[in-house]
Amino acid sequence: MRQRIGIQQPADHLLVLGMMLFSLMLEKLNALLAQSNRHFNRIFLEYELLRSGQEIGYDL
């Protein structure tokens, strides 16, 4: 005789809810870091374009 196991209702205990909230927090952190990286790249590119005529010499 085989018995089937099924899920009748979604899990609502604290571990699942905590991991779901932690996952959302990580997604927001990842988006924030990606946005700050884009801002840094833009600022760095502008700085490089402004000082493109300067050359750094090696005076030893």
Image (tube, rainbow, N blue to C red):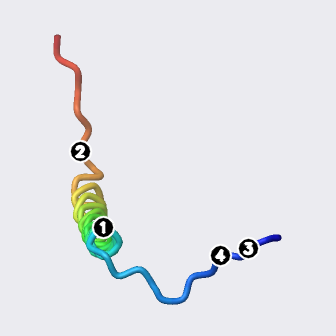
Tell me the distance, in whole angstroms, between the alpha carbons under discs 3 and 1: 28 Å
Question: Which of 8/24 is in front?
Answer: 8
CB atoms of marks 3 and 4 within 8 Å: yes
Height in image: 45 above or below 56? below
Residue drawn at (63%, 81%), measured in percent from left and top? Answer: 6
CB atoms of marks 1 and 2 within 8 Å: no
Residue 53 in the image: state x and y as whole percent.
Answer: 27, 50
Residue type at mark 1? Leu
Residue type at mark 4? Ile
Tell me the distance, in whole angstroms, between the alpha carbons under discs 4 and 1: 22 Å
- Res 37 seen here: yes
Q: Which of pointers 3 and 1 indicates the residue nearer the eye?
A: 3
Q: Earlier in the sequence, mark 1 or mark 2?
A: 1
Tell me the distance, in whole angstroms, between the alpha carbons under discs 3 and 4: 7 Å
Q: Earlier in the sequence, mark 3 or mark 2?
A: 3
Q: Which of pointers 4 and 2 indicates the residue nearer the eye?
A: 4
Horizontally, residue 27 falls left or right of residue 29, namely right
Q: Earlier in the sequence, mark 3 or mark 1?
A: 3
Residue drawn at (29%, 52%), measured in percent from left and top? Answer: 52
* Badge number at residue 5: 4
Residue 25, image quadrant: bottom left
Tell me the distance, in whole angstroms, between the alpha carbons under discs 1 and 2: 57 Å
Q: Which residue is mark 1?
A: 15
Q: Which of pointers 3 and 4 indicates the residue nearer the eye?
A: 3
Q: Which residue is mark 2?
A: 54
Residue 39 in the image: state x and y as whole percent.
Answer: 25, 69
**Quick one: SS at disc 3?**
loop
Question: Which of 46/1 is in front?
Answer: 1
Q: Which residue is mark 3?
A: 3
